[in-house]
Amino acid sequence: MKAIFAGSLDLTYVGQGPALNAHLKSNGEEIRILAGAANGGAALVVRSDGPLKKAADFRGKKIATPQLGNTQDISCRAWLKAQGFKVTQTGGDVMVLPTANPDQLALFQSGGVDAVWTVEPWVTRLERDTNAKVFLEDTDVITTWLASSVKFLNAHRDLAKKVVNANKELTDWIQAHPEDAQKILISELKEETKADFAPEAVSQAWKRIQFTTEVSRDLLAKAVQDGKDAGFLKGSTDTSKLIETP
């Protein structure tokens, strides 16, 4: 989002939290959502043999989230508030600790946090590597959007339309060929990280993700409300300009 504001980026896949926050901070003058990419794939995980059995058990506990103000961080804080907890950026009834995804696993294993609210593939990693279990799966959430700068969209609407069409073509192919898509993903991840990814783990994570080009107005409204409940969205929350299909 900072790169779009700086004029050094035209298009990006991004989570709902950062995109929405950037749009509202610019009073609707920047950031346009051209299409959806993925929904769901997020969850709150706890220890399988731990004491966290119901929402009330989280009082006084520590929950890790990927990043302050990111989609899962906002969802976590909004959910905690809905359970009656007071949560601030530095404390409250439940401590929410923004922690980079790769660091969550070790922190959870060592007992540094009691639970983790994160997104795939980290949910599956926690399940498989740390004896964690899903306490709550967050299915009604926009995980990734295709976003554009206003300048790019206005100046290159035809090109933006081609990108949107390519996004749909890719999404349709992923939906029709999940096994082939997973093989490509594993190969690409190995190329990028030099690490092997178990096909079984990728398949497990895949089941939680909804690949879609739709931008749900209902989920957008929920995202706005969650942002307000979490204390990140203040002032105007007008999103009438946010979604613009070229």
Image (spheres, helix red, strand yellow):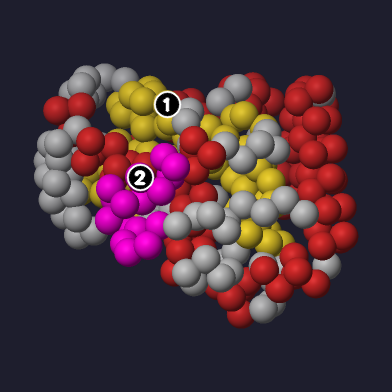
- Horizontal side of 198 relative to 94 (left or right) equals right
**Tag 2 residue:** 226
Quarter of the rendering containing residue 91: bottom left
Quarter of the rendering containing residue 133: top left
Of marks 1 and 2, which one's residue comes earlier in the chain?
1
In the rendered view, would you say 142 is above or below 230?
A: above
Point out residue 98 in the picture as x, y percentages from the top left corner.
35, 54
Amino acid marked by disc 1:
Glu
Point out residue 2 in the picture as x, y percentages from the top left corner.
55, 72
For image coordinates 29% across by 42% down, the residue present is 78
Q: Is residue 216 magenta?
A: no
For image coordinates 49% across by 71% down, the residue present is 26
Q: Are marks 1 and 2 in contact (CB under 8 Å)?
A: no
**Tag 1 residue:** 137
Point out residue 241 in the picture as x, y percentages from the top left corner.
57, 58
Circle 2 Cα neighbour tier, 10 Å, few/some/many (<14 / 14–19 / ≥20) = many
- Magenta residues span 221-237
In the rendered view, would you say 30 is above or below 15?
A: below
Q: Is residue 222 magenta?
A: yes
Amino acid marked by disc 2:
Asp
Q: Is residue 100 visible?
A: no
| Disc 1 to disc 2, C-alpha distance | 16 Å
Quarter of the rendering containing residue 63: top left
Question: Residue 133 versus residue 152: which sits nearer the camera?
Answer: 152
Query: Where is the N terminus found, in terms of image quarters?
Result: bottom right
Q: Is residue 47 visible?
A: yes
For image coordinates 62% across by 29% down, the residue present is 210
Question: Residue 37 versus residue 135: which sits nearer the camera?
Answer: 37
